Amino acid sequence: MANVKIVSQAEYLPLRLSLLESEKENTRARDELARQRRSLPVVEVTTPYTFTNEDGKEVSLVDLFDGRPQLIIYHLMFSPDWEAACASCSLLGDSVPDLRHLHGHSTTFVAVSRAPIDKIRAYKQRMGWTFPWVSSSGSSFNYDFGATQDEAVRPIQYNFKDKEEMEKRGLAHFARGEQPGHSVFVLGGPLTGIGDDGKVYHSYSSYARGGEPIINTFTWLDMTLLGRQDGLSGVGGLGFKRHDEYTAEDLKGLPIAKIGA
C-alpha cells in the first residue's frame, strides 16, 4: 500500500475521530433513508401468483408469509437452464442470518428463483443453507417484479430504468436474463392497520447494489485497509466463488501487494 502513511498514535487519533464524525453522519443518513422507505405507499398485488415449495406443493404468495404480517423475498438468480445458482447471489445466500431473529420481529424471509424445485433442493443441500426457497417456474412473478428481463414477456425495466436508459448508462448487461433483487410485502388487516384484511401489498423493491448491505463479507472487508480487493480475483460478478469452489491456493489470499501503488 504505497500511499499509506505510518504515524504515531497521537497523530492517528485526531484523524480517526474526524472519520468517526463522518461515520456517524452516514449512520444518521441511513436511519433517515429507512424512515423514508417506511413512509412509501403500498400497492395491492392482484395477480394470484403460485410457487412450488420444497415439498413439491403449490403455494400462494399469502402462504409464503407463513402466518407473519411481513414478507421479504430475495430474487436469487437461478435460471431453469442453469445447473447452479449465481455465485454472487450465493455470496448473499451465505449471509442470510438465523431467521428466528426476523420471525421474532413479525417478518418472514423466502428466496425465490425460476429454476425447478428439484434443482433448488439439490443446490440448497450443496450450499448447506436452511432458509426457505421456492420456485416461481411457470409464473410471471420474477418478470413482474423486475428480477427477470425478457422483452418477449414484458418491457425491460430493471432498478426502475428502461432498456434505453440502461444502455445509455452502460448497464446493458442488466437488461437481459436473471437479475438480483429484493421485494417486500405486507399483509393487510387489523394487525398492520393497512388496507383490507387478507390482501397482499407490495411496499418496496431494491435491485443491483441495493442488496450489498445484506452481504456481511463486504461489511467486514470495508473495515480493512485492503478493502474489497475488487477485480483481483479474476472471478466475474462480485468477484467471489461459491464457498465450496475455493482451492487451497485461493484461500492463501489474493495478490494485493500493488494495491494503491
Image: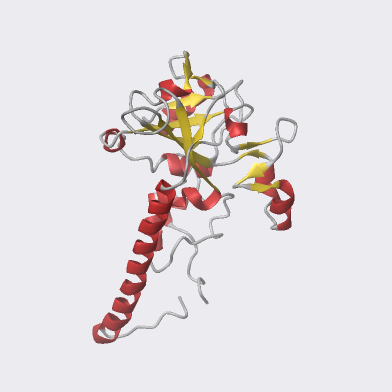
Which residue is nearer to you in this view: 3 or 50? 50
Residue that appears at 50% across and 63% down:
255
The quadrant of the image that shows the N terminus is bottom left
Quick check: 83 above or below 19?
Answer: above
- Relative to 83, 222 lies left or right: left
- Whole-percent x, y for residue 87 in the image: 52, 42
Quick check: 194 above or below 121?
Answer: below
Residue that appears at 56% across and 59% down:
231
Which residue is nearer to you in this view: 133 or 9? 133
- Whole-percent x, y for residue 70 in the image: 37, 33
Mark yes or no: residue 238 visible: no
- Whole-percent x, y for residue 62 in the image: 43, 22
- Whole-percent x, y for residue 91 in the image: 46, 44
Quick check: 177 above or below 35?
Answer: above
Quarter holding residue 184:
top left
Which residue is nearer to you in this view: 38 or 175? 38
Q: How many marks?
A: 0
Quarter holding residue 186:
top left
Mark yes or no: residue 9 visible: yes
